[in-house]
Amino acid sequence: MKDYKNYYILSAPPEEVYIALTNPATIQLWTGEPAIMSTEPGSEFSLWEGSIEGKNLEFEPGKKIVQQWYFGDQEETSIVTIKLHEHKQGTSVELRQTNIPDEDYDDIVEGWNEVYFYSLIDFYEN
């Protein structure tokens, strides 16, 4: 099992980025796919036609999102924590994901960088 941590800069205030990550209609705007999402702790979510699925654990509006991501029959839970910080260019996003299965690590990192946050950065820059 591996952990991953990275930072991203988005050209929007933290409150807007939080909405983009938690509102299903806004998620659909930047992913191009319908999304199932709620800010209710314990609710399940699904993004990119089920490519990403899990359970919402904790929310601090405009500041933090904590989710459990599902990987088949994995024994240890993979926790994704996204923290939003004000930055002179908009928002600094601190991403941390724990307990990524070794065989999925490269795909997960590529997904974060080349799909998930690439799409979100592109959404704010265009």
Image (spheres, helix red, strand yellow):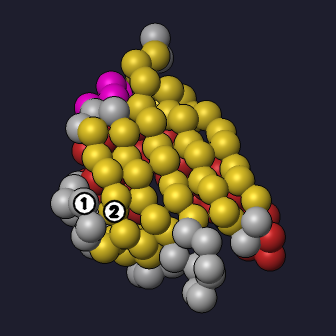
* Residue located beneath label 1 in the image: 41
Circle number at residue 56: 2
56 up-or-down from 48: above or below: above
Give the spatial CA distance, label 2 vs label 1.
5 Å
Q: Where is residue 50 shown, x and y percent of the image?
A: 44, 81
Q: Which residues are magenta?
A: 12-17
Q: Based on the displayed image, in which of its 4 quarters is residue 41 positioned?
A: bottom left
* Dot 2: element: strand
- Residue 34 percent coordinates (x, y): 30, 73
Residue 56 lies left or right of residue 100; in this view the side is left
Rendering coords of residue 59 (x, y %): 28, 46
What amino acid does circle 2 point to? Asn
**Res. 95 in view:** yes
Sequence-first tag of 2 and 1 = 1
State the residue at coordinates (63%, 56%): 98
Pick whichever, 107 or 115, lies toward us.
Answer: 107
Query: Residue, x 76% and y 59% (percent of image)?
Result: 2
Q: For this view, does 3 lie left or right of residue 79?
A: right
